[in-house]
Image: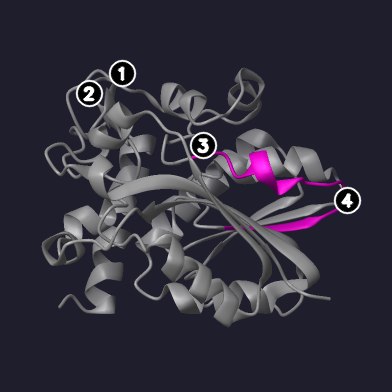
Amino acid sequence: MQTNEKIKKSVRQTYGEVARQGRYVQEPLNNPSCCGTFQQTGTGQQSGCGCGSKQFDPKQISASLGYSNEDLKAVPEGSNLGLGCGSPKTIAGIKKDETIIDLGSGGGFDCFLAAKQVGKNGRVIGVDMTVEMISLARENKKKMKTDNVEFRLGEIEHLPVGDNLADLIISNCVINLSPEKQQVFSDAFRVLKPGGRIAISDIVALKPLPKDVKQDLLLVSACIGGAATIEETTMMLQKAGFENIQITPKKIDQELIDEWMPKSRAGEFVTSTYIAAKKPF
């Protein structure tokens, strides 16, 4: 059995490398990561998805997942790393002046989009456990020239946020990476205000994963090996205290799913889903 610390270390290393590849012109990325990361060539040109033969770049991936052209143009260059499996804003119903927390904020893509929606009196807090991602997001914030977004280093299992602070928690293809999902949902419940809500895009298992898939750290980092089933996710949300739980599998290009990890037969095991729930008043 892989220990929780080994899983976290593997995920941290994988996404630290993604952040470095996104910031600098280095060697091609050999370790595939969540939902379609990209390579950088020696000339500095993006060569598409690093996970397989078909070429995807971050904008293509995000467009296929539901982001509009306006969304893609509204964020700083380098904040969209093509790491999502959906668009949380599709179900978030973001309102002016809200406080939002993004679990696993990466380069800041979803944070910057949310910041535009909450307005100058709203607040967006991105949390990521990877130093390189936090550094990248803070650099992107400088490009964005916005005062209502901040990025904090921390684990989504133990958020560096006070109790009853947020109106909304969003997350995009990150909770599946955690080996302590119950703790993630419980801490999300803690930091939400009464009546607060979650709007999450994530990967779930269509059926119990084979042991060899669950134990493969590369598959875990590729958003496959750590996926919980819909039933397991529902039970964890209920245990955390959430109500009005809705888990809606989302149609996604099967070819894109298979690109996340070629020859893994990923599409047989997992799918993208939207997860919504509320904290009672």
Is residue 161 in sight in this rendering? Answer: no
Sequence-wise, which precedes: disc 3 or disc 2? 2
Sequence-wise, which precedes: disc 4 or disc 3? 3
**What is the spatial separation of the Cα atoms under label 1 and label 4, in whole angstroms?**
38 Å
Q: How is the image coloured?
A: one colour
The residue positioned 47% from the left and 25% from the top of the image is: 64
Residue 253 against residue 20 in the figure, above or below: above
Pinpoint residue 56: horizontal percent, then vertical percent.
Answer: 33, 23
The residue positioned 71% from the left and 37% from the top of the image is: 145
Is there CB contact under 8 Å for labels 2 and 4? no
Quadrant of the image occupied by residue 52? top left
Q: Amino acid at mark 2?
A: Thr
Name the residue tied to disc 3. 79
Q: Secondary structure at mark 2?
A: loop
Name the side, left or right, on which 122 lies relative to 269: right
Name the residue tied to disc 1. 45
Sequence-wise, which precedes: disc 1 or disc 4? 1
Name the residue tied to disc 4. 121
Is there CB contact under 8 Å for labels 2 and 1? yes
Range of residues picked out in magenta:
86-102
Sequence-wise, which precedes: disc 3 or disc 1? 1
Residue 41 is marked as 2
Residue 97 colored in magenta in the image: yes
Quadrant of the image occupied by residue 69? top right
Neighbours of disc 1 within 10 Å: few (<14), some (14-19), many (20+): few
**What is the spatial separation of the Cα atoms under label 2 and label 4, in whole angstroms?**
41 Å
**What is the spatial separation of the Cα atoms under label 4 and label 3, in whole angstroms?**
23 Å
Residue 145 colored in magenta in the image: no
The residue positioned 66% from the left and 21% from the top of the image is: 70
Residue 139 against residue 66 in the figure, above or below: below
